[in-house]
Image (cartoon, grey):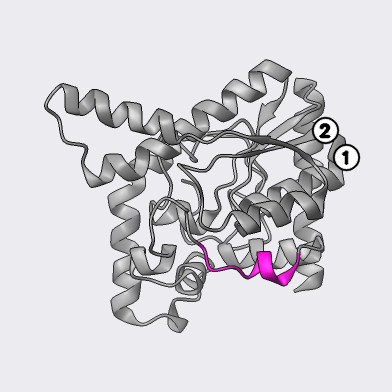
């Protein structure tokens, strides 16, 4: 996998640097969650543009259980750190709804913090003359495990066409520790892991994307296809610049 990870890196490097030159983009803002996706994106930016041009933003919602992992990312990469707890802002939204006799739904409770985080990332980036980096991967997007106008947004999306497994391997190739690279994916906004909440494994989603359907049980294949159809409107709604990987097959290519 090392050779593939290096090839993936070279593809991202060529696309990202060209994009940056065209926009005269010199600084990059990344929301650091402590997970492999944001860590990999930050590591990529450091390697290509220098850590002095990467600003990481920690965005807990009234604290964060795995803040130690966030701290480890900053310690490992040595990037500038900004800390903004969105807890009070989220509470204000909830109160404004209740003041109008509207009870916040579970879906709104999960998605509102993600949108607040993106609002803060753009407030930071536009205040310092930087660009926001999207940290979503292909596996999340295919099954709708991203938030419209939240983590789905950004100015450049270096890993948007990579599966979760490919992001993990790329992170390791970049020197990210196994503790961070192999961390159980969780969004930090709810107690369940991504896989428990989705009811499917990223490895199965990855296999479907790359055309290895025979490695996935039929009932899971159907579940993944259903999730894709149900959430396809999100994919059409987002068109963020990012590298394509023509040497990687994609069962959902063209969307």
Residue located at (46% from left, 46% from top): 255
- What is the quadrant of the N terminus in the image? bottom right
**The quarter of the displayed image where residue 214 is located:** bottom left
Q: Nearer the viewer, residue 182 or 203?
A: 182
Q: Are marks 1 and 2 in contact (CB under 8 Å)?
A: yes
* Residue 135 vertical placement versus 3 (above, below): above
Q: Nearer the viewer, residue 119 or 87?
A: 87
* Residue 78 vertical placement versus 83 (above, below): below
Q: CA distance from mark 1 to mark 2?
A: 6 Å
Residue 149 seen in this snapshot: no
* Residue 243 vertical placement versus 20 (above, below): below
According to the image, label 1 marks what residue?
50
**The quarter of the displayed image where residue 234 is located:** top left
Residue located at (73% from left, 18% from top): 129
User: 6 left or right of 115?
Assistant: right
The mark total stands at 2
Residue 50 on the magenta span: no
Q: Could you say where residue 12 lies in the image, as x and y percent from the top left?
A: 75, 48
Residue located at (64% from left, 58% from top): 69
Q: Could you say where residue 111 lies in the image, as x and y percent from the top left?
A: 36, 41
User: 18 left or right of 39?
Assistant: right
Around disc 1, counting alpha carbons within 10 Å, would you say few (fewer than 14), some (14 to 19), or many (20 or more)? some
According to the image, label 2 marks what residue?
53
Which element is circle 1 on? loop
Residue 53 seen in this snapshot: yes
User: 147 left or right of 159?
Assistant: left
Magenta stretch, residue numbers: 177-185
**The quarter of the displayed image where residue 123 is located:** top right
* Residue 51 vertical placement versus 120 (above, below): below
């Amino acid at each position: 996998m090392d050779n593939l990870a290096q090839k993936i890196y070279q593809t991202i490097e060529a696309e990202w640097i060209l994009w940056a030159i065209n926009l005269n983009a010199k600084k990059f803002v990344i929301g650091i969650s402590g997970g492999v996706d944001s860590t990999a994106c930050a590591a990529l930016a450091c390697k290509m543009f220098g850590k002095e041009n990467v600003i990481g933003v920690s965005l807990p919602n009234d604290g964060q259980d795995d803040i130690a992992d966030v701290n480890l990312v900053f310690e490992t990469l040595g990037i500038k750190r900004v800390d903004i707890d969105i807890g009070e802002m989220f509470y204000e939204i909830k109160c404004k709804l209740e003041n109008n006799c509207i009870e916040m739904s579970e879906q709104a409770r999960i998605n509102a913090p993600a949108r607040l985080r993106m609002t803060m990332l753009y407030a930071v980036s536009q205040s310092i003359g930087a660009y926001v980096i999207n940290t979503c991967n292909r596996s999340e997007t295919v099954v709708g495990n991203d938030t419209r106008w939240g983590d789905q947004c950004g100015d450049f999306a270096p890993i948007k066409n990579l599966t979760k497994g490919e992001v993990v391997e790329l992170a390791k190739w970049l020197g990210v520790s196994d503790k961070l690279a192999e961390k159980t994916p969780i969004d930090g906004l709810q107690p369940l892991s991504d896989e428990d909440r989705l009811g499917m494994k990223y490895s199965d989603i990855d296999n479907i994307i790359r055309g290895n359907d025979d490695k996935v049980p039929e009932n899971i294949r159907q579940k993944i296809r259903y999730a894709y159809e149900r959430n396809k409107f999100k994919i059409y709604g987002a068109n963020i610049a990012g590298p394509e990987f023509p040497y990687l097959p994609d069962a959902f290519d063209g969307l």
